[in-house]
Amino acid sequence: KQEVTQIPAALSVPEGENLVLNCSFTDSAIYNLQWFRQDPGKGLTSLLLIQSSQREQTSGRLNASLDKSSGRSTLYIAASQPGDSATYLCAVRPQNSGYSTLTFGKGTMLLVSP
Amino acid sequence: GAGVSQSPSNKVTEKGKDVELRCDPISGHTALYWYRQSLGQGLEFLIYFQGNSAPDKSGLPSDRFSAERTGGSVSTLTIQRTQQEDSAVYLCASSFSTGRGGNTIYFGEGSWLTVV
């Protein structure tokens, strides 16, 4: 059974710092990996989608990498801002469960202080 | 619509009552998902619809839970005889047809259910 782990569970940084969030998964047989952010009391907002054949994706100050063979992904946030404060979730689409399910980690709660 | 729309946004119900949660996916999206997020827990898959195919109901926690999708668009998640452990945020998501590469999945704001 695919399991997704995110480390750290919580992170507090001052504004302007670059930071890395980690995601690991136990089964490398995945179709893709997606990073989301969730603000308190809100739904999930998709940030980046990396297909299994890709190594990284970039969007603005965000860069996500994928090392499928080692079961790892990182989300790099450059020059963090207070507006980046949220919970960040990674999810994989396992190959052995068809197309239907995403398996989520429990998230990293990020606080960027001014 | 511009995004995935869910209603109600908040629902407080008495134990034992039935509740219906509605999801209106992004126009043109053939895949629709329901997830549940309990306090301090990760997202739990409930059910998946893809076009006219039979839904994947493998995540439904009990036979009190059911869902349907009418006309390939709007979906309703029904919880019968609600229990306190059903209290959670119920999140709906949609995407274009899933293929080997997969597509970006877009989530609604969720329906916050509290069973008292």
Image (cartoon, rainbow, N blue to C red):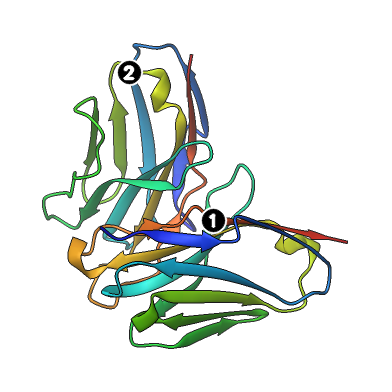
> Taking B78 as reference, is A2 above or below it?
below
* Rendered-image quadrant of the N terminus of chain A: bottom left
Residue B111 drawn at (x, y percent): 47, 36
Q: Could you say which quadrant of the image residue B1 lies in?
A: bottom left
For image coordinates 31% across by 66% down, the residue present is A93
Q: How many marks?
A: 2
Q: Which residue is mark 2?
A: B18
- Left or right: B47 with respect to B115? left
> Taking A41 as reference, is B11 above or below it?
above
The answer to whether residue A103 is visible is yes
> Mark 1–mark 2 contact, CB under 8 Å?
no
Amino acid type shown at disc 1: Gly
Q: Which residue is mark 1?
A: A107
Amino acid type shown at disc 2: Asp
Task: Chain letter for mark 2, please.
Answer: B
> Taking B35 as reference, is A52 above or below it?
below
For image coordinates 76% across by 71% down, the residue present is A80
Q: Could you say which quadrant of the image residue B103 lies in?
A: bottom left
Real-space Cα separation, disc 1 to disc 2, in angstroms:
31 Å
Front position among marks 1 and 2:
1
Q: Residues within 10 Å of mark 1 (few under 14, many from 20)?
A: many
> Taking A12 as reference, is B71 above or below it?
above
For image coordinates 30% across by 16% down, the residue present is B81
SS for dot 2: loop
Residue B96 drawn at (x, y percent): 31, 67
- Left or right: B68 with respect to B84? left
Q: Residues within 10 Å of mark 2 (few under 14, many from 20)?
A: some
